[in-house]
Image (cartoon, rainbow, N blue to C red):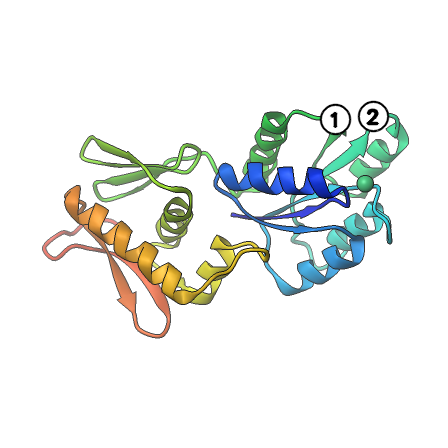
Amino acid sequence: MKILVVEDHGELRALLIEQLERSGFAVDGVATGGQALTALHLNNYDAIVLDLGLPDIDGMQVLRRLASPSGQRLPCIVLTARDALDSRVAGLNAGADDYILKPFDMSELIARLRAVLRRAGNIVEETLALYNVTYDPACMQMEVCGRVEVLPRREAMLFEELMRAAPRIAVKDRLEQCLYGNHEPSSQNAIEALVSRLRRKLQQFGADVRIETVRGVGYRLSPQAGKSGRI
Ligand code: CA
């Protein structure tokens, strides 16, 4: 799940990025409305956290752009100052899914974000299951035959994408975009390394699925030889 954070206050932006990443999201952070529109044009996001008071174009204008194109709208949480009651109402009319008053509690923001993602159909708290493997994205926990492992953040993000894609292929370029924010260095080698670690774990735990490499395209969760059933 990739989130765009639009906040001109540098410290708050850094804090938002850090906390959202800690909760298992990939995050891009930008400081202006113009940068937000560019980022939205270049990347696919699952949701946006948007400050209304921006130095260039107003957050409201960014919001209206989100509302306009063909049907599918990005889930949005608006951040607004406690004294700007009118903008809250206007924000919701323009298509924000929720708003949160500054100063706010980070855990509340993350709970609200999960709620708007859930409402948008990007259900982030369901447990994903495939053969004898289950994965709970909310606590980054993989379980195989009763053996439980909390995955490190980046492995967790990759595994979630593979589980959601199955039985289809998770395309490498898309994985790179999902796993890394634009402030983080990424490489296909780094993804290879994560895949190796996940492969080892699945094997050690006796999983009925393995990560298959589809050359030049990406990765896919496939049944181990001799295993059959619904995938
Ligand atoms: Ca601001």
The quadrant in which residue 34 appears is bottom right
Question: Can you tell which mark lies on residue 80?
Answer: none
Residue positioned 35% across, 74% down in the render: 216
- The answer to whether marks 1 and 2 mark residues whose Cβ atoms lie closer than 8 Å is yes
Q: Which residue is mark 1?
A: 103
Residue positioned 40% across, 49% down in the render: 164
Q: Residue furthest bottom?
A: 216
Residue positioned 21% across, 51% down in the render: 200
Q: Which residue is mark 2?
A: 82
Give the amino acid type for the residue marked by disc 2 in the picture: Arg
Classify mark 2: helix, strand or loop.
Answer: loop
* Residue closest to the eye, 105 or 61: 105
Give the amino acid type for the residue marked by disc 1 in the picture: Pro
How many marks overall? 2
Residue 121 appears at what percent x and percent y? 54, 42
Residue 88 appears at what percent x and percent y? 82, 32
Can the viewer see residue 169? no
From what the image shows, is residue 167 above or below residue 207?
below
